[in-house]
Amino acid sequence: MATHQAFIGIGSNIEPRTDYLHAAVEALADTPNVTIQAVSEIRETAPVGPICNQPAYLNAAVELETVMQPHDLLVALLDIERAHGRNRDDETRWGPRTLDLDLLLYGDLVLDEPGLQIPHPRLAERRFVLEPLSDLAPDLVVPGTDESVAVLLDRAIAAESQI
């Protein structure tokens, strides 16, 4: 079976935030057919989106290798979220969450299907995703953009400074 490199974004803004992030990494490590390669530093960021009156997020990224297909990996991520108290059906979009696990990249795959887009939508504009991803793979070219994580991060930082 071929192995695939994947990057997962993890975040939490409900206490205990750090515990949720560490639990997510442990759960990923315990997931069959997944091997963690690296974990970024944790960063605190302001909420993004229409609901700004909520606690700050802690964000990180995880690099892993897997033989799982993208949809199966997404199911595993959603199972980990649910096991840590997140119920996507009952939450407010853009609102607080115990744990958010996003499949950011999966090899050089570009996929746009209902329920799964790879690279993750808006990855290229989100500093809170690009900074931890840059810890792990600054020179990685994001599929569909022909630009590295570092270049996208520089652009996101520049765009923020113009706001």
Image (spheres, helix red, strand yellow):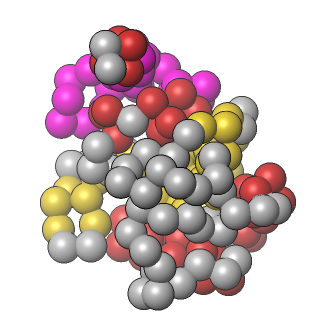
Q: Nearer the viewer, residue 29 or 66?
A: 29
Identify the image quadrant of residue 28. Answer: bottom right
> Residue 138 in magenta?
yes
Q: Residue at position x 35%, y 54% from top?
A: 50
Position of 26 compared to 90: left or right? right
Residue at point 60% right, 25% down? 135
Q: Is residue 129 above or below residue 55?
A: above
Residue 35 located left or right of residue 92: right
Which quadrant does the C terminus fall into? top left
| Residue 136 colored in magenta in the image | yes
**Which one is nearer the viewer's eye here, 10 or 31?**
10
Picture coordinates of residue 54 (x, y %)?
58, 56
Specify start and end residues of the magenta stretch as a single range.
133-157
Which quadrant of the view contains residue 83? bottom right
- Residue at the (20%, 57%) spot, across then down: 111
Position of residue 94 relative to residue 161, above or below, is below
- Decide if residue 161 is in sight here: yes
